Amino acid sequence: MRSRAVQIQRRLFSTSVSRNSDFVHCIIGGGVVGLAVASRLATRYRKPTLLIERHGEYGTETSSRNSEVIHAGIYYPENSLKTKLCIRGKELLYDLCEEQGIPHKRLGKWILAQNEKERGILEGLHEKCGRLGVATEFIEKDEAGRLEPDVHSPFGVLNSPTTGIISVHDYMTYLASTLEQFDISLQTTVVSLSRTSSGNYEITAKSASDQEPFTVTADVVINSAGLSAPLVSNMLLPREKHVAAYYAKGNYFSYSASRPKVSRLIYPCPVEGLGGLGTHLTLDMAGRMRFGPDVEWVDDPHDLVARDSRLQEAVGAVSTYLPGIKRDVLAADYCGIRPKLQPKGGGFQDFVIREEEGFSGFVNLLGIESPGLTSSLGIAEMVDEVLYK
């Protein structure tokens, strides 16, 4: 879908918009969450909608650089948005995949216990899942060894049967197809955002194909800019409401040998304060095995090169639960950056999804990292409720 910045400059929708704005909805950011929000608002209300994405394709930063896992919703505090929206988003996502034929698989996931302490952690996780209504069950050592003989877990595994994988590309392609009658400006960067005296918002953006920036107005602005979301928020909000951005890089590693072999996703026991879920084993839609992400705190959100220098640490982490792994066929593959709102060691940070006080119609989506993909339709539903409850 091509950029239409020139057309946008020439279009007005004042007969349809209460404040004589060019658009009712403007969504900044065309990752999987921005696409989900734009799709819901545009198709539900059929009002003039603009999606602005700074890259030439959708989801080229965080959305296409992850494990492509549909999470069950079991890791985070029970009353958190991450838990609530992951569980709700999972239900909506599976339904959509089945309705629209989006490639996905309910492979299930094992979370492993290597010692008594980890078994205790998984026991607590299992109890929490019971309270949340999320299916989990224990599989003891002997049965686990029969089902997955190459996996080492001497203290059993916690099975999560509702975990799966999805083709993120096909999912985003579907969401984009619902926006074909609306306005999309790719390769376009927002350079300023302000509120007008009329109470709507003025967005100035620069398209890669034009020398001069263009300006449009909108009643509603959704900041779904991912790694750049703090920057966009700080353009509009007063200094005392500014937020800082931190970045946790996750490197992924490909594996080209036929053994060891597994048939489901394999995760280590979660470690508090790590910044992720540990270097886990996932399968893509073709059944190929890959490992990651690890956690590497970086200052540059554009550092999207996976390096072999991280391999040794990854091998150490993976060999704990997959002792037959062959080091010489493991290679750095790709990486992604998690948008964080706290530095390393800062503790749990929930999703921030809110209409900012004093800025009616401006909804901030900050710190939308994992499980953002799984939660995307749930987040879109919540944004709709925030705006039109």
Image: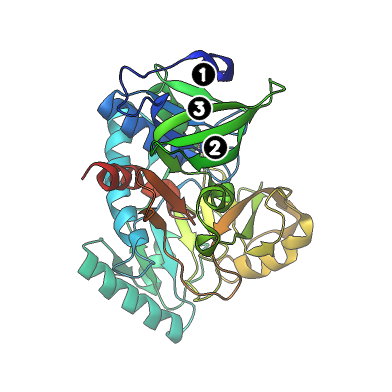
Left or right: 105, with 327 as reference point: left
Which sits in the foreground, 61 or 314?
61
Q: Specify how the rendered protein is coloured.
A: rainbow
Label 3 neighbourhood size at 10 Å, few (<14), some (14-19), many (20+)? some
State whether residue 167 appears in this view: no
Residue 143, how many percent across, how many down? 36, 67
Q: Earlier in the sequence, mark 3 or mark 1?
A: 1
According to the picture, the residue beneath numbered tag 1 turns out to be: 8
Please tell me whether residue 178 is drawn above or below residue 132 in the rendered image.
above
Give the Cα separation between the discs numbered 2 and 1: 22 Å
* Tag 3 and tag 1, C-beta contact below 8 Å: yes
Q: Earlier in the sequence, mark 3 or mark 2?
A: 2
Give the Cα separation between the discs numbered 3 and 2: 23 Å
Disc 2 element: loop
Name the amino acid, label 2. Answer: Gly
Q: Residue furthest right?
A: 309
